């Protein structure tokens, strides 16, 4: 078979790869006969030939799903590796992508994971800076970011959905993305110097971060893991970190000596929206925003934040705080929470080492006389809190997330699915953790006594299975600080 060179555009050329692979498989060209050249290395291979169109190629869903993220990986061998995968699948190994122990599949899965992690980092750590006026007097912002992989085109729609109201540009060493309020366009690479170093709002952010920093929870290793040092230069609030850490010991002493403080003051809605729009850079900063925000339905005493260590192996997501949780300000302390604690114990899970949180952070209820009757949060409320939940889980970085009941499934997956169908191991989209679905403990409380014991045993069995899955899940490698 004569050797060939297939030349694709620089970066992630998904269309080019698809066209080429169809052609190669239809023509029976094996991987060892092909050299793949991405645009940036084209000069090394002057004999490169353009990809020619081929006939349709039906691939199993798992293979088709692997191709786009791997194409975004910076590894120069990415197209060749995918060619080997497709070649073997077309040769009859239809379920190859599900064989996790196969060295090729394993390598591709790691590449996919690395790209997913890079996307998360870009969403979480990119910061816009004010860069003058844009079209028709709109405000204009710019950001500099250095992704590890070719993810700009994939990452950019997240920012146009989140920041539709101002014009912005994201500059990277590989290319740029631009939003004018209507259209997202892509252009040539930018330079770091093209983005202003500081803007007036940064001082506000740094002060805000300093005011939400909890010296009693200072853990440098965890801070670095949450927010790798590589990204610090882009984050205005990091300027405050060294001083805050130096001061932490003294401030903890003062906190212990000081009498209790009154509840947090609510932050004005506009200031809050701007803070949220800047993406909190730590769990503490995120929690400060949640704590200061108004409930969607008035009446709740306070926001109930997640509880448990960062890096917990398992995170449990419930529906929303109940009456007791609302009063005490802690998740799962009322009747359903006590039942959950018992089931966790019976399943051999240490509650204190797990992370517990809710899809919705405020108690939603209807008043009947003096009683506050729980109301299931609507899809709008769940969607409103979803962004927070996603950030929260990204900071905690568990290996496995357990959805307790249908509201949690909706919050984690964006889909409304009956628990009877979803129960067991699950995936919640392209997340860096595994998923698991089981019933909500309050469901057990509503059952007649006769049915409760059996259902409880099933619930404990679910929790045991979840613990086993979490123990075997590959730990989420945190980026080095
Ligand atoms: N139910 C939940 O879903 N969460 C709690 O925190 C308490 C009860």
Image (cartoon, rainbow, N blue to C red):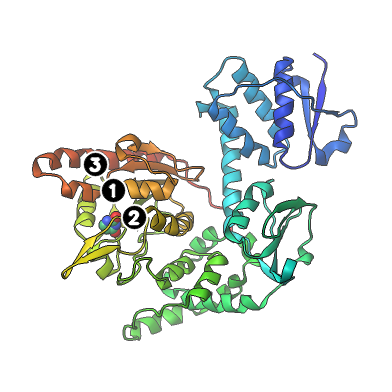
Outermost residue to the left: 450
- Among the two numbered marks 3 and 2 on one chain, the one whose residue lies closer to the N terminus: 2
Kindly indicate the quadrant of the structure image that contains residue 417.
top left
The residue under label 3 is 459
Residue shown at the point (45%, 60%) measured from the top left:
388
Q: Nearer the viewer, residue 18 or 87?
A: 18
Q: Is residue 158 left or right of residue 193?
A: left
Q: Residue 352's x, y, as percent?
A: 31, 57
User: Residue 341: percent from the left, percent from the top?
Assistant: 23, 53
Mark carried by residue 353: 2
Task: State the residue at coordinates (37%, 55%).
Answer: 359
Point out which mark residue 74 bears.
Answer: none
Name the residue nearer the viewer: 9 or 394: 9
Tell me which corner region of the image, top left, top right, bottom left or bottom right, holds residue 170. Answer: bottom right
C-alpha span from label 3 to label 2: 19 Å
Q: Which residue is mark 1?
A: 349
Task: Name the element at disc 1.
Answer: loop
Asked if 376 appears above or below 301 in the picture, the reply is: above
- The residue sitting at 38% across, 65% down in the picture is 296
Mark 2 neighbour class, 10 Å CA radius: few under 14, some 14 to 19, many 20 or more: some
Residue 345 visible to the viewer: no
Answer with the quarter of the image where residue 363 lies: bottom left
Residue 321 position within the rendered picture, expressed as x and y whole percent measured from the top left: 29, 61
- Secondary element under disc 2, as helix, strand or loop, is helix
Q: Residue furthest right?
A: 46
Q: Earlier in the sequence, mark 3 or mark 1?
A: 1
> Do the residues under discs 3 and 1 have CB atoms within 8 angstroms?
no
Residue contact between numbered discs 2 and 1, judged by CB atoms under 8 Å: yes
Give the class, few, some or many, for how many residues have Cα within 10 Å of label 1's Cα (few <14, many ≥20): some
Secondary structure beneath disc 3? helix
Whether residue 58 can be seen here: yes
């Amino acid at each position: 078979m004569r050797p060939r060179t297939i030349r694709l555009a620089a970066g992630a050329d998904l269309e080019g790869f698809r066209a080429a692979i169809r052609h190669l498989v239809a023509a029976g060209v094996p991987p060892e006969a092909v050299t793949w050249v991405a645009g940036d290395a084209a000069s090394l291979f002057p004999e490169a030939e353009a990809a020619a169109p081929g006939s349709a190629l039906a691939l199993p869903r798992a293979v088709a799903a692997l191709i786009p993220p791997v194409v975004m990986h910076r590894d120069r061998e990415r197209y060749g590796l995918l060619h080997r995968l497709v070649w073997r699948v077309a040769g009859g190994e239809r379920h190859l992508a599900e064989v996790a122990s196969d060295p090729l599949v394993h390598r591709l899965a790691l590449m996919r994971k690395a790209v997913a992690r890079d996307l998360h980092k870009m969403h979480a750590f990119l910061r816009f800076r004010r860069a003058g006026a844009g079209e028709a007097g709109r405000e204009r912002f710019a950001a500099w970011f250095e992704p590890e992989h070719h993810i700009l085109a994939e990452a950019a729609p997240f920012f146009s959905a989140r920041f539709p109201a101002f014009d912005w540009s994201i500059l990277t060493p590989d290319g740029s993305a631009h939003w004018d309020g209507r259209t997202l366009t892509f252009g040539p690479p930018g330079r770091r110097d093209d983005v202003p170093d500081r803007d007036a709002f940064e001082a506000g952010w740094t002060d805000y971060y300093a005011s939400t920093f909890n010296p009693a929870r200072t853990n440098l290793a965890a801070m670095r893991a949450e927010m790798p040092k590589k990204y610090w230069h882009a984050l205005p609030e990091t300027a405050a970190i060294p001083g805050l850490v130096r001061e932490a010991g003294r401030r903890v002493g003062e906190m212990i000596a000081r009498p209790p403080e009154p509840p947090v003051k609510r932050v004005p809605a506009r200031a809050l929206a701007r803070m949220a729009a800047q993406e909190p850079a730590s769990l503490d900063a995120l929690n400060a925003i949640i704590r200061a925000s108004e409930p969607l339905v008035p009446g709740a005493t306070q926001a109930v934040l997640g509880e448990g260590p960062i890096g917990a192996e398992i995170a449990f997501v419930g529906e929303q705080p109940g009456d007791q949780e609302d009063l005490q300000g802690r998740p799962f302390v009322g009747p359903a929470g006590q039942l959950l604690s018992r089931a966790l114990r019976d399943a051999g899970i240490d509650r204190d080492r797990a992370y517990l949180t809710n899809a919705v952070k405020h108690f939603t209820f209807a008043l009947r006389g003096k009683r506050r009757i729980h109301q299931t949060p609507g899809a709008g409320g769940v969607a409103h809190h979803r962004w927070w939940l996603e950030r929260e889980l990204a900071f905690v970085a568990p290996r496995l997330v357990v959805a307790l009941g249908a509201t949690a499934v909706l919050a984690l997956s964006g889909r409304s699915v009956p628990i009877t169908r979803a129960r067991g191991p699950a995936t919640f989209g392209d997340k860096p953790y595994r998923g698991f679905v089981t019933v909500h403990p309050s469901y057990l409380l509503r059952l007649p006594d006769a049915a409760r014991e059996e259902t409880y045993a099933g619930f404990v069995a679910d929790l045991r299975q979840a613990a086993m899955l979490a123990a075997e899940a590959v730990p989420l490698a945190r980026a080095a600080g």
